């Protein structure tokens, strides 16, 4: 079973005829698992799920393919664990940043910087999350991650809407819009890296907060109030 302790792996491979074999690094089961996760994370980020093979993962780890299957059951299993680990790490950052109450603008700044900090510090992790999940995978996707973050923001917006006399039921719509905007900018910024993250966050907050600060209680579209065009 996965949680059972594993004996240390043998120190070296059996030599093949006519070929020198370098010593294999001795690792415990948990150490090997962490190594495979790190290698998978790097390859999935750089090449994507489909272009990454079990053979390449095993070669990079200097193990045989059965070792990868033993730990994760295959490429799909490894991918799911990598994605879940990154999702939990990023959600943990958001939870911590939004746990302390504060002025709405301050909280928007925190939320924007959480994502940009993560992109800067864990670029491979963000690339894995922001790629489309394979059809064969039961793991999470970027859209499901955005949904989780939006649900956290929804509670904050709901309190603010209620205090300002807006319909709290609309907090879900606005939270999806705000988080989606930040996430899409993050996907663009992961490659651009210009301007700097604090300037990017400032522009995001400028658009979102100043827009929220002047919300119309009952917005309508201009086309719904303009007179119909005269017949030609």
Image (cartoon, grey):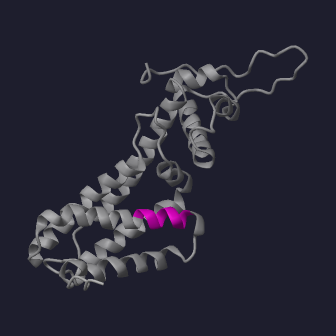
Residue 230 located left or right of residue 12: left
Left or right of 209 on screen, residue 42: right
Q: Is residue 11 magenta?
A: no
- Quick check: 217 above or below 20? below
229, 8: nearer the viewer: 229
Q: Is residue 187 magenta?
A: yes
Q: Residue at x 73, y 21 (%)?
A: 12
Residue at horizontal 45 percent and vertical 47 percent from the top:
86
Instruction: Considering the whole magenta stretch, tell me its main secondary structure.
Output: helix
Quadrant the N terminus occupies = top left
Q: Is residue 30 above or below residue 47?
A: above
Residue 110 left/right relative to 74: left
- Would you place residue 130 above or below residue 116 in this image? above
Residue 224: x percent and y percent? 20, 77
Quarter location, residue 57:
top right
Residue 99 visible in the displayed image = no
Tell me where the magenta segment starts and ends, as one range.
183-190
């Amino acid at each position: 079973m996965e949680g059972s302790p594993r004996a240390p792996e043998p120190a070296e491979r059996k030599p093949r005829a006519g070929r020198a074999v370098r010593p294999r690094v001795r690792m415990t089961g948990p150490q090997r698992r962490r190594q495979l996760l790190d290698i998978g994370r790097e390859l999935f980020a750089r090449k994507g799920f489909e272009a990454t093979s079990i053979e390449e993962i095993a070669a990079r780890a200097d193990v045989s393919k059965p070792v990868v299957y033993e730990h994760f059951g295959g490429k799909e299993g490894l991918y799911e664990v990598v994605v879940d680990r990154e999702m939990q790490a990023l959600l943990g950052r958001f939870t911590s940043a939004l746990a302390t109450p504060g002025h709405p603008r301050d909280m928007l700044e925190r939320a924007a910087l959480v994502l940009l900090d993560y992109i800067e510090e864990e670029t491979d992790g963000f690339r894995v999350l922001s790629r489309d999940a394979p059809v064969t995978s039961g793991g999470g996707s970027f859209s499901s991650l955005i949904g989780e973050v939006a649900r956290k923001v929804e509670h904050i917006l709901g309190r603010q809407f209620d205090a300002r006399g807006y319909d709290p039921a609309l907090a879900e719509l606005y939270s999806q819009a705000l988080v989606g905007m930040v996430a899409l900018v993050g996907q663009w910024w992961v490659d651009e890296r210009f301007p700097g993250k604090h300037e990017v966050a400032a522009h995001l907050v400028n658009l979102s907060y100043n827009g929220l600060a002047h919300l119309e209680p009952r917005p309508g579209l201009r086309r719904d109030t303009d007179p119909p065009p005269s017949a030609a």
